[in-house]
Image (cartoon, rainbow, N blue to C red):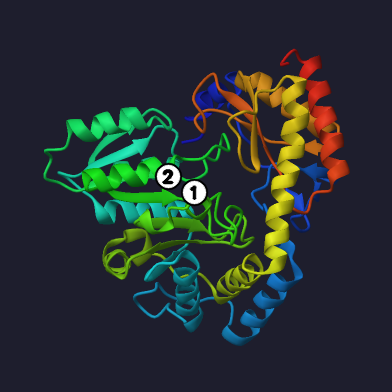
Amino acid sequence: MPGIFLKELDALKAQGLYRRIRTICGSQGAHVSLEGRDVLLLCSNNYLGLADHPYLKEAAMRALERYGAGTGASRLVSGTMELHEELEHRLAYFKGTKGALVFNSGYAANTGVIPALVGRGDLIFCDRLNHASIIDGCLLSRARLLRYPHRDMTALRRKLEETSSSEGRKLIVTDGVFSMDGDLADLSELVSLKKEFGAILMVDDAHGAGVLGACGRGTAEFCGVEAGIDIHMGTLGKALGGFGAYVAASREITELLLNRARSFIFSTSLPPSVLATALAALDIVESSEGRALRNRVMRHAETVRCFLGPAGFDTKASRTQIIPLHVGGAAETMEFSRQLLDQGVFVQGIRPPTVPRGTSRLRLTVMATHKEEDLERAAELIAATGKRLGII
């Protein structure tokens, strides 16, 4: 039936919401080759620069030679190999839990974990700016979803008090680092509330793991509340440079997920080379090199904020390597992005439905492998372009 969706595509273009893929040639680094041009990459989640690290590449090649290219089955059939168990043991130790389970992506983890733990008759308390994968997991669970205003602990307490007589399970779920603003959840208060009201607390730390905390264990370590989190979710494809995700929790919870999480049960397992890169990445994160990379990425982020804030951009919410530059309209945001790319700076525009209508923005992300002079030049170009477009 050719043509039946053309009107929808035309509507997306008219609203400035049409998307297309941009192809990078070669490896992921501070500079990349984008459609034949060398550009500074300022929109990658490769925060520590590990995606093309020689140690990870060597580990992947060794695993490929020893174990082959794939696993051939899901984990519960014949797709569990020794590297799966080694990585899960390592992740549990890294996060300070009794158990861990590897998933194929962060989206698969959230849409698998939440419906496995709560269902009809249960309650979910969800930050309004949580990632789409959390929202989808909540909806799939069929539990009653109660969304509270972003980081508003007073509103969350009120909702917990109003439902205190409920007999079902109560799950509080939040991002650790909010991926569009770079701000942090108030984990100390969330831990206090979950204890007071007998709730389960789940933290999606996709953007904190590897980056935050003295040992890189993430937002919970940074906030000093690791033991108070019941379920730690993290990804292997951002700061850790590879692919996949994990859940670290009690052995009771991980065993339940193994039996009930549909995205785990019905997916072919991650291949050996991917598992080996994750193990290698953890080696680096836990080493002195990892500490140096974390310090560098945070120093870079502060450099960019200190330049763009006085230039007129509001960067106050950001406390991490994610720095949003709010524009407002989708079309204006994409024009800003286009003009920067013309000048050799690749910063992607973020539009609805990723963010609410009227809050489109450029989302800058810095990496440990960026050079200070490149970031300073990029900040100057961003400020000059923002002024030219009337954004600041």
Decide which of 197, 2 is in the foreground and name it: 197
Does residue 73 appear left or right of residue 221 in this picture? left
Q: Position of residue 273 (x, y in %)?
A: 60, 74
Res. 320 visible in picture: yes
> Please, what is the three-letter code of the amino acid marked with disc 2?
Leu
Q: Earlier in the sequence, mark 2 or mark 1?
A: 2
In the displayed orientation, state which residue is furthest to the bottom: 66
Residue 223: mark:
1
Does residue 117 appear left or right of residue 247 in this picture? left
Question: At numbered mark 1, what does the secondary structure look like: helix, strand or loop?
Answer: helix
Q: Are marks 2 and 1 in contact (CB under 8 Å)?
A: yes
Indicate the quadrant where residue 369 lies: bottom right
At horizontal 65% and vertical 28% (from top left) the residue drawn is: 315
Say few, some or many: other residues with alpha carbon within 10 Å of mark 1 (under 14 / 14 to 19 / 20 or more): some
Does residue 251 appear left or right of residue 36 in this picture? left
> Please, what is the three-letter code of the amino acid marked with disc 1?
Cys
Residue 187: mark:
2
In the displayed orientation, state which residue is furthest to the top: 390
Say few, some or many: other residues with alpha carbon within 10 Å of mark 2 (under 14 / 14 to 19 / 20 or more): many
